[in-house]
Image (tube, helix red, strand yellow):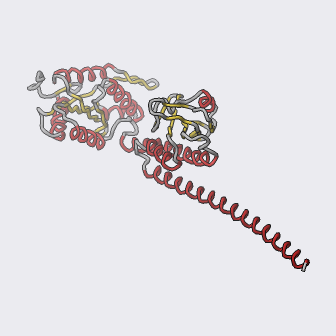
Amino acid sequence: MDDYKLKYEQTKSEYESYQRITESKLQELSTINVQYEKNLDMLSNVLFISNYVNSNLSSKNIIPIINDMIIGIIGVTQSTVYLKEEEIFVISATNGTKESIKLTGECIKYIDQHKTFILNSKIPITKDEVNKICIHSRMGVPIKVGEECIGYIVVDHTHFNFLNEFHELFLNTIANQIAIALENAILYKKIEKAAKTDSLLGIYHRRTFYEIINERLTEEDIKKYAIVMVDLDDFKKINDTLGHLFGDKVLIETTKLIREKLGPKDILARYGGEELILYIDCNCPVNEIFNKIDSIREAISKNFIQDGNIRKSITASFGLGFYPYDGDTIEAVIKTADQYLYKAKDAGKNKVLGSHKYMYVD
């Protein structure tokens, strides 16, 4: 009987030991499973942000939207994205207040070293008395392109010990996505600019000029404007006698000279070959526009283009059209300017011509 009782106790002990081991393993597997689910959620969110970034390269609000995503995905109280401008980190997006996102000396030390940091403190790291925000947990991760640190993501929570290595992994991944977004945005802008501008002169194409002017005339209440057609005199002769490279230099330097004399709202574009077109903001008497264009004409004629042993000055002819005096559409005003350009060429070149009937109209 005692043998049976002893065997029972041994079996019971073995079963309880097995049960404890099994429960421990189940708990361990459950913990691992929860971590896998977290990792899967993080991966899913990273993929979502990545897809969003790739679909919105041209969006001006891409950083603020990513910042909002960070807040929603990891559940922090506030998030701030800093980007470097002229060697200084400037806030690009935040949902915090000036006081609550303030960087402490310890934070600045890590940022200067371009290091990731996690700060947890029972005493508030920062606080905003007015809005009753006390930050007890803060994390910062650098945004890097190659070895260069171009920004920082700093996230905060009001709870002590909220942020940990799991959040660090996620934020590092997001920092990489922001870096990719910025690189792609820069590339996108370069491609966009290349599509809109003349590769030689760096000014708008004819088609882009029309698009910009029509958009401006649609969106703004513009009462007056001038269109100026410009043609470099005897340009074909320059190409034939001095070569196309010197001809290109003439175009580049003359275009630069004209651009320097334009106002902030004036627009210059290459209309075709050696012909340029100008949109002039016309908030002054018409005769002042004539004087402005004539000063450009004179500056061109006095400018010498130098290339090695070649040194030559050129002249240009100008035709002016004014809205609303010369037509009620952009096409009509351009047509008038073009007609006066050819009259200037026929009259001996190096002239500015337009209708004199409205010379002193305000």
Indicate left or right for 27 with 345 as reference: right
Percent position (x, y) of residue 354? 15, 28
- The quarter of the picture where residue 35 lies is bottom right
Percent position (x, y) of residue 207? 29, 44
Which is nearer the eye, 77 or 63?
77
Residue most toward the left?
A: 357
Q: Which residue is depicted at the point 42% across and 49% down?
A: 56
Q: Which residue is depicted at the point 18% across and 39% down?
A: 330
- The quarter of the picture where residue 350 lies is top left
Indicate left or right for 239 with 114 as reference: left
Q: Which residue is depicted at the point 42% across and 42% down?
A: 189
Percent position (x, y) of residue 331? 18, 41
Which is nearer the eye, 231 or 235?
231
Using the rendered image of the protein, determine whether residue 155 is visible from the camera's viewpoint: no
Q: Which residue is depicted at the point 29% across and 33% down?
A: 267
Which is nearer the eye, 62 or 289?
62
Using the rendered image of the protein, determine whether residue 279 is visible from the camera's viewpoint: yes
Residue 43, placed above or below residue 340: below
State the quadrant of the C terminus.
Answer: top left
State the quadrant of the N terminus.
Answer: bottom right
Percent position (x, y) of residue 140? 58, 38
Task: Say how many tags the image has.
Answer: 0
Indicate left or right for 18 with 346 as reference: right
Residue most toward the front?
A: 1
Which is nearer the eye, 153 or 292?
153
Residue 359, placed above or below residue 81: above
